[in-house]
Image (cartoon, grey):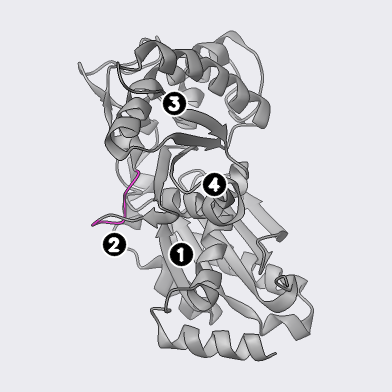
Amino acid sequence: MSLDPRGAFAIGVRLDRTRIDTVLIDLVGTVLAQRTHDRLLPAPPQALAIVREDVEALVADLAPAYRRRIAGVGVARPYNLGSWLEQLDLPRTAFLPWENVAFGAELAHATGFTVIEENDGSAAAIAELFHGLGRGCDDFLYVFIGPAIGGGVVLGGQCLRGATRNAGDIGMIPVPPSRLASAPGTSARDILLSRASLNTLRRHLRARGEPAGNASLPCRTPAVEEWLEDCADALAAPLLAARAFLDVPTVVLDSDLQPEALERLTDRLAPHLATHVTEARTRPKLLRGSFGSNAGALGAATLPLFESFGPRPPSHESHVEGALHIAAS
């Protein structure tokens, strides 16, 4: 027996500080269609218009008979869009309008679909748990390097949320300041987010006079190599701390970086972990994530499917009705 991929569909939206992704997936997690905007996140009304148009376009890609099988829309976004902008070298005025915005409710009203929101790091971890390495691994720390850096914690095959639904927010861990000449260097301590993110890579590229328009390119310039080494150095201690505190044997590392560049980062990170691992402990096993830039949107799209068809009772009565209708069709 196996699932019929056409038994249900869902849409996932990833809102990030410099990117918007919207995907359509089937019941087994195959991405059927996708729309991407590489741009600074606009104000909520403009973002809502973009996402609504994307959702409508993806729905139109489905045959009419399948459109009633859409379980809903998931939205993955950082819960603190207006924070840490100085460390990310982003304009504060661009994100002030996002404070206290109920984007999920507005999108539900605009599209007519049930909308479920999730922290972007946890959503990407959910994609890995359900559709990637999680099929053979029950305990891991998931780390995603995008415009910022975030992640999720999977223990016993379950994605942990935490009291504020920010479990796995590795970017907030204190680290020593960067040694890069482009770093602000304003304090004796820093946070991981200010060293291990693509926005800090772009800042370093600009400081070194190199093109910074697409920092995901796997180019081997001196500035990129400098940042990769600094990023690996910054990641080592937080990952070893997570290994000790959570007792997770595996770290899954994914990114908006191209696969070749992520592989180079992983290669640089391994010796840092080996050097600093403590007595009676082992370094975590490093695995590359399965989905790259699609991870957040794919995880978001998984939320309404799991809400309707997962083994745990759905939290909303309307989802039960939708699940019964789709299963019977």
The mark that comes first in sequence, 4 or 2, is 4
- Which residue matches tag 3? 200
- Element under label 1? helix
Q: Earlier in the sequence, mark 3 or mark 1?
A: 1
Residue labelled with disc 2: 100
Q: Which residue is mark 4?
A: 19
**Prevailing secondary structure class for the magenta stretch in the rendered image:** loop
Q: Do residues under tags 3 and 2 come within 8 Å of each other at their CB atoms?
A: no
**Secondary element type, mark 3:** helix
Alpha-carbon span between mark 1 and mark 4: 16 Å
Dot 1, how many residues are within 10 Å of its Cα: few (below 14), some (14-19), or many (20+)?
Answer: few
Along the viewing direction, whichever of 240 and 143 lies nearer the viewer: 240
Please report the bounds of the magenta region as a residue range: 163-168
Horizontal side of residue 267 vs 280, given as left or right: right
Image point 53% across, 82% down: which residue?
A: 112
Residue type highlighted by circle 4: Arg
Tell me the element at label 2: loop
